[in-house]
Structure formats: C-alpha cells, structure tokens
Amino acid sequence: MALPVVNHNGATVMETDKNSCSKCTGDDLQLKHTWVKLNVGGTQFLTTKTSLCRDPKSFLYRLCQEENDLKSDKDENGAYLIDRDPEYFRPILNYLRHGKLVVDKSQELEGVLEEAEFYNVTEVIQICKERIKLRDDVHHQSNVKNVYRVLQCSEDELTHLVSSLSDGWKFEQLINIGSPYASYGGQDNAEYLCVVSRGYPNRTPADHNTDRSTLLQKAMRMT
C-alpha cells in the first residue's frame, strides 16, 4: 500500500508500506516457491505446492499438508515415495500445473483414468470419462452398417406392423402403392410398402440385403 509522505523539501511523495506488502503476498509467495519432490515408481518429479494443491480433494493436496493422515515414506533425497506408474502420472501432474490434459499417443486414456482415480483428481477423472465415451461412440458409429427390409402390408395391417417392430428394427419410410384391385372398381384398402432398418456391427449378415434402392425396386416389380 502506498502512503503520502512529505520529504525535507516540502514535496509530497508516495512511500510503500512494507508491512502491508509483506502481509498481502507473503503466504502466497511462500506456497508458490515451496518445492516438493516426488518419487513415483522410481522416477523423480519436482513441482510446487501450488500445483499439487490445485484439487483440495486429491491425495496430492493431503500429502502437502503439514499435518496429514497419510503415512508416506521418503527416499534418501527427501522425495515422497509413491508406488504408481510414472508415465501415467506425468499427464496428471501437467494438468495440475497448467489446467490442460495432454495425453501422449502411446498412452491409453483408461490408464490415465486409473491413475486419476487413485490420486482422486476429480477434474481429470471427468475429462477422461468424457473422452473415452466420445471415442467409443465414434468407433461404434463407424462400425455399424444399416440393413434395410421392405415389408408389404394393407392399410388395416399397417398400424400393427409399425407398433410391433422389435429386436432393433425401426421404421424408415412408407410408400403407398394403391390397391391391386383398383382397376376393377374394387373397394379394397390400399397397399403399402414399409421400409424398416436395423444397425449391425462389423460385417453384415449374409442373409440380409442392405441396398435400400434395390429392395424397393424388387418390391415394386412384385406388386
């Protein structure tokens, strides 16, 4: 804090309140510049308490407290001994440092998630689960092929046909092909072609025709 002071020439100057500055920044600077050594699976890591204390619910936060309930041994260099995988700990520590989860291409997200759950770093746990779900959804969609069937039914049968679809089959399209007896002046109900589909993983079963346009052409020729 700057205070007005009159010097010997009568001019007013601003003087810094040293006690005030020390009070404002002392604790923060002490925490920021307190270095912590970690020995994770035989690999040495050096970081600050500020980074390790980013998540107050984590194991690492508790480890940094002067009075903690964790019984962690130290090696000859004073580093906390943690019997975990150092390669999967690295992206977690970097996240605590800068807030971005960067996973190497050689690493599996499940491995990072496993370590994040051990250290109880909640934000990393959530990010890993979201990325795994997105990856699995994309993989599933790329390995699914739609199989189509064309079913012919009368107007009376239509409602029952659509409502009774099961085993993954779903309605796609309805085509009115008229009545087969319309040219004779009959009063029969109209006939319909009902297109239904189902997704199959990987290879399509050999007994299913998957070409929607081909199925429609065949069905039209048969009516």
Image (cartoon, rainbow, N blue to C red):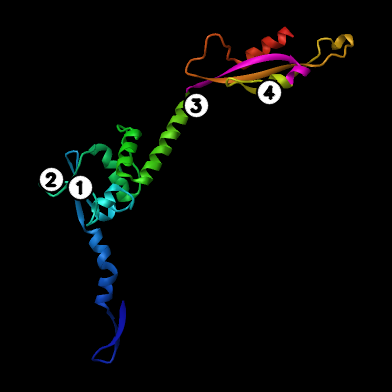
Of labels 3 and 4, the one closer to you: 4
- Residue at 28% across, 46% down: 93
Which numbered disc, 3 or 2, marks the residue that appears first in the sequence? 2
Q: CA distance from mark 1 to mark 4?
A: 63 Å
Q: Secondary structure at mark 4?
A: helix
Task: Reply above or below: 189 against 124.
Answer: above
Q: Spot the residue most to the left.
A: 76
Disc 4 residue type (three-letter): Ser
Q: CA distance from mark 1 to mark 3?
A: 47 Å
Is residue 157 a member of the stretch shown in magenta? yes
Disc 1 residue type (three-letter): Lys
Which numbered disc, 1 or 3, marks the residue that appears first in the sequence? 1
Which numbered disc, 2 or 4, marks the residue that appears first in the sequence? 2
Q: Which residue is label 3 attached to?
A: 141
Q: Which residues are magenta?
A: 143-158
Asked if labels 1 and 2 touch by Cβ distance under 8 angstroms, the answer is no
Judge left or right: residue 41 versus residue 172.
left
Residue 150 position by quadrant: top right
Asked if labels 2 and 3 touch by Cβ distance under 8 angstroms, the answer is no
Q: Which residue is label 2 attached to?
A: 75
- Residue at 27% across, 78% down: 17
Asked if labels 3 and 1 touch by Cβ distance under 8 angstroms, the answer is no
